[in-house]
Amino acid sequence: MSVRRSTVIFAWILLLPAVLYVTVIVAYPLVDTFILSFTDASLKKTTKWVGTANYDKIFNATFAEVIIRTFVWTAFSVAIKMIIGTFGAVMLNAAVPGRALFRVLTMPPWIVPMAIGIFMWGWMYNGQFGMISGMLQNWGLVDGPVAFLAHGSTAFWATIITDVWIGVPLVTLYMLASMQAIPQDLYEAAWTDGAGRFYRFRRITLPLLVPSMITMSMLSLIATFNSFDIIWILTQGGPNGDTTTMIIDTYRTAIGSKKYGEGAARAVLICIFLSIFCIAYFRVTHRLASGESR
Amino acid sequence: MSPPAMINRYRWYELVGIYAGIFVFLTFILSPFVEGFLVSLKPLGLLFSSPYRFWPENGSFDAYRSMWVSVPGFARYIFNSFLISTIVTAVVLVLVVPSAYAFARFKFRGSGALLAAFLAVNMFSGAVLLIPLFRLMRSFGVLNTYFAMIVPGVAFLIPSGIWLLRTYMMRIPRELDEAAFVDGASHFYTLRRVILPIAMPGITVVAITTFIGSYAQQFIFALTFNSKTEYMPLPIGLYAYFGRQEVIWNELMAASFVGIAPAVILIFLMQRYLVAGLTAGAVKQ
């Protein structure tokens, strides 16, 4: 047996456990979702094929609203995460005393169990006794209590803000790392030529950060589209479905109402959207990588 | 003075601007924790009173005592979270270390596509695959056991582990493997005696991030696949403070802080490795 051949076999032996695991726990369920979406599976013992009935049922005005809402929610959340996260990274990149501590202090929302952070926000959004409504009243900015999670439009924004809060640390750390990967001699050369700090930031830092910003936004897009815990704990998709995104809708149908078939059809749609994002992500990162080496 | 020292010197107004920016940023990040901590100090009567008061007048640490009485099982929830996360971390390491080495060192037909397939797992949250996973757990007969939370949890932590460790291992000089190989060492011996010791810092980072990921994100599987109180992890266990009439907010917040304390201590001890490891994995893309 050639060395080359034994190497390949060895590589496959190393990979086999992880490949098998992911096949059973992720790939098989993915296929199963697709199959289930054409059945009337539920708690009943028997299931039968129903063709595209589940898909016909979900393509109606309410569901179109859910799709649009999901995209609007995701778009705002990603955009705000990127803005705040990059702002934080720029600030924490400055060589000022205390920055090591400040960097550690950005991590808690990401590291603490999500549910705990969300409980804290839930209390802050409370209308009667919560901090935000209370502060606004004490400062005379609003007349009476504002129950943020009880009204559609405020609940929509409240869930976005909490999602942003949980996502910002990762964006900040990622952008910080990208900034530190920028060669220092670029700054020194510009400094020698008399370029000011703001000029250096605008002409060196920002342009070189664009690829990282694109990569991070796409990763963030995929994670945000999947966001479940935040909305589920804060509003369970209410009031009146005003915070029901596709994931929440799927969970309600499948686990809440036990309509596995209809839920699976919804999950398939989510998978299709995610695949589009994923392909876009790979193409963009590939292009960025080949652009760099050119 | 040399340029690197001069270039980092700030004028006073630049310093003011930077610190103001950091202050605003950290206020957003930390205010829920500050408020949560103050809530844990306030008596319930003060919490449910208007107008809102930020500072806890006659605050006390009573809630940190009474939380153990109102929910006697609370210690069990923390234990469950630790147990689940520890097992998840161990299984992830066993699966990730060999595959990361294979991806870092060997190029073979389909290796690129396979790596991409692993990374694609990252895009599905557990929520999308919940229905078949539920059926799968039911057919394994593990619903309402620890395994129902461990088995799916592992799968979704494998991809980032492979990615991180692969990046780390690619920086280990290839000459080391080759030297061992020329000396007649087998592939397996090379991995165990040459690569593993050198890769230890990278493996540590993967272990920490996996542990944190499992500790922080074990919500949806625990919510859906387990209904037995004695197996509940911390995030679900906290719902015990949601009474019929009202939420016991001060005890809920006290319990949250007690529950996150172990993870926070871990992070402060490990933060240097953590930031270095995470960023090493991230930037290389």
Image: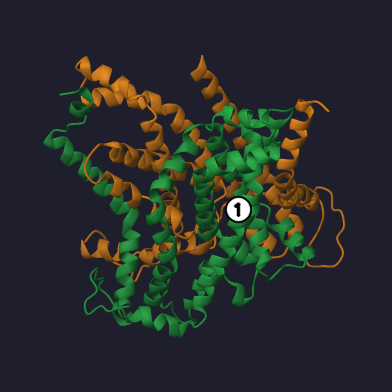
Q: Nearer the viewer, residue A47 or A72?
A: A47
Camera sees residue B124:
no
Residue A33 x %, y %: 75, 51
x and y percentages locating residue A199 in the rendered image: 25, 22
Determine whether A172 is above or below A214 in the image: below
- Which residue corresponds to mark 1? A247
Query: Outermost residue, left direction?
Result: B12
Outermost residue toward the bottom in this view:
B69
- Which residue is more in the foreground, A259 or B251? B251
Q: Is residue A126 visible?
A: yes
Q: Which chain is orange?
A: A
Q: Is residue B275 left or right of residue A240?
A: left
Q: Is residue A179 left or right of residue B4?
A: right
Residue B9, horizontal then vertical, whole percent: 17, 31
Location of residue B256 with respect to B66 vertically, above or below: above
Determine which quarter of the picture holds residue B137.
Answer: bottom right
Q: Is residue B109 left or right of residue A231?
A: right
Question: In this structure image, what is the colour of chain B?
Answer: green
How many residues crowd mark 1 within 10 Å: few (<14), some (14–19), many (20+)?
many
Please state which of residues B108 and A281 is positioned toward the viewer in this rendering.
B108
At horizontal 59% and vertical 64% (from top left) the residue drawn is: B84
